[in-house]
């Protein structure tokens, strides 16, 4: 997982790696940007979980446009925006964000799929893990898991 800020145009707005890690860990949702089968852009907001190492996991139906895009073009972009605050009188917005270059793949291994679903349940339903895992097991065959292996990433922020 290469945190690389050299390509960020506004070097005065670099987000520290520790703040970027916090945003990746705690972000509510991200935006997955793909290329469809015809070469057209396709972007969707999606819930996610980071494994704390180098992978982001997403869950979805076992068929659909997202999986078709990944099958054709596995290189994707994923971004997360933290809290924002528009300041009208200053014509600006306070924000933090990260942009990730990743390789996307459908997870075939059942053990890794369940691991990802456990991480998702822990993130989005803390304190309800036992019930959430029962739900995950019950819908396991109807649920696909996508893994984004992080290649490069960077972060920016504007603070006031």
Image (cartoon, rainbow, N blue to C red):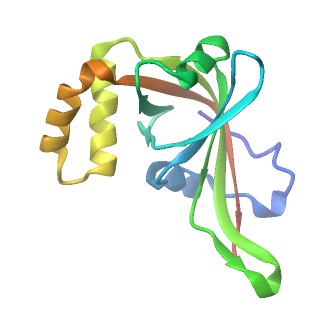
Q: Residue at x 14, y 34 (%)?
A: 134
Asked which quadrant contains residue 133, the reply is top left
Q: How far from the left and from the top, in percent, is residue 103?
A: 61, 22
Left or right: residue 13 compared with residue 145: right
Left or right: residue 70 compared with residue 112: right
Nearer to me, 106 or 19? 106
Asked which quadrant contains residue 141, the reply is top left
Q: Residue at x 19, y 41 (%)?
A: 132
- The residue sitting at the bottom extreme is 89
Name the quarter where the N terminus is drawn. Answer: top right
Q: Is residue 46 above or below residue 60?
A: below
Left or right: residue 156 compared with residue 135: right
Nearer to me, 40 or 8? 40
Q: How far from the left and from the top, in percent, is residue 97?
A: 65, 55
Q: Is residue 155 above or below residue 56?
A: below
Q: Residue at x 19, y 27 (%)?
A: 137
Left or right: residue 149 compared with residue 51: right
Q: Residue at x 57, y 66 (%)?
A: 83
């Amino acid at each position: 997982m290469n945190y690389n800020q050299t390509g960020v145009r506004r070097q005065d707005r670099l987000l520290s790696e520790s703040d970027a890690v916090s945003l990746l860990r705690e972000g509510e949702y991200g935006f997955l940007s793909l290329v469809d089968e015809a070469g057209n852009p396709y972007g969707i907001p999606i819930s996610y979980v980071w494994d704390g190492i180098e992978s982001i996991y997403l869950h979805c139906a076992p068929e659909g446009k997202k999986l078709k895009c990944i099958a054709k073009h596995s290189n994707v972009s994923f971004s997360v925006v933290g809290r924002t605050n528009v300041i009208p009188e200053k014509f600006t917005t306070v924000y933090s964000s990260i942009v990730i270059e990743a390789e996307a793949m459908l997870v075939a291994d059942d053990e890794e799929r369940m691991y990802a679903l456990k991480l998702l349940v822990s993130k989005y339903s803390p304190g309800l893990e036992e019930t959430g895992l029962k739900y995950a097991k019950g819908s396991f065959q109807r649920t696909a898991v996508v893994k984004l292996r992080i290649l490069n990433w960077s972060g920016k922020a504007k603070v006031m």
